[in-house]
Amino acid sequence: MLDETEFAEVSSLYRAAFRSEKPKGLSLEALFAPVSQAYERLTGYAGRQPNAVIHHRIAQYGPPSTACGNPLRTPEARYCAACGKVRHEQGDSSR
Ligand SMILES: [Zn+2]
């Protein structure tokens, strides 16, 4: 499990990869390789899927703030405790 600082690093790499335009021919694995590499460096666990890394964390703490990137305190948090940004709802919920 990552602490706050470690997760901030991994999640910022994840967001950067997610936002970047995927070059033609580059696999998603290659695009997200920096995330896996950072996770391996921080935890010693190799070969983790970036999505699994992020979603495991989100399951416990909630997604990162869309404004400042700090994780929300719970998956149900309605706003960011760090900066006060109201959570952006992603359309229809799973409930
Ligand atoms: Zn925030």
Image (cartoon, rainbow, N blue to C red):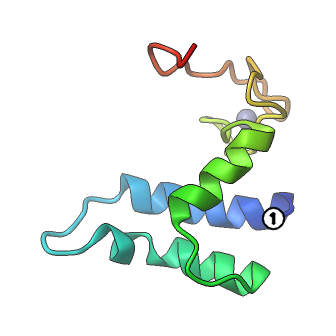
Q: Is residue 72 above or below residue 12?
A: above
Q: On the picture, is 5 further left or further right than 64?
A: right
**Viewer-side residue, 83 vs 5:** 5
Taking the spot 66% from the left edge, 75% from the top edge, the residue there is 39
Q: Amino acid at mark 1?
A: Leu
Residue 6, by quadrant, is bottom right
Taking the spot 51% from the left edge, 54% from the top edge, the residue there is 15
Image coordinates of residue 55 in percent, x first then y, are: 62, 48
At label 1, counting other C-alpha atoms closer than 10 Å, the crowd grade (few under 14, some 14-19, many 20 or more) is some
**Ligand 1 sits in which quadrant?**
top right
Q: For mark 1, give the secondary structure.
A: loop
Image coordinates of residue 69 in percent, x first then y, are: 67, 45
Q: Is residue 91 above or below residue 28?
A: above
Residue 38, by quadrant, is bottom right
Q: Is residue 86 above or below residue 61?
A: above
Image coordinates of residue 53 in percent, x first then y, are: 63, 61
Q: Which residue is mark 1?
A: 2
Image quadrant in which the C terminus is located: top right
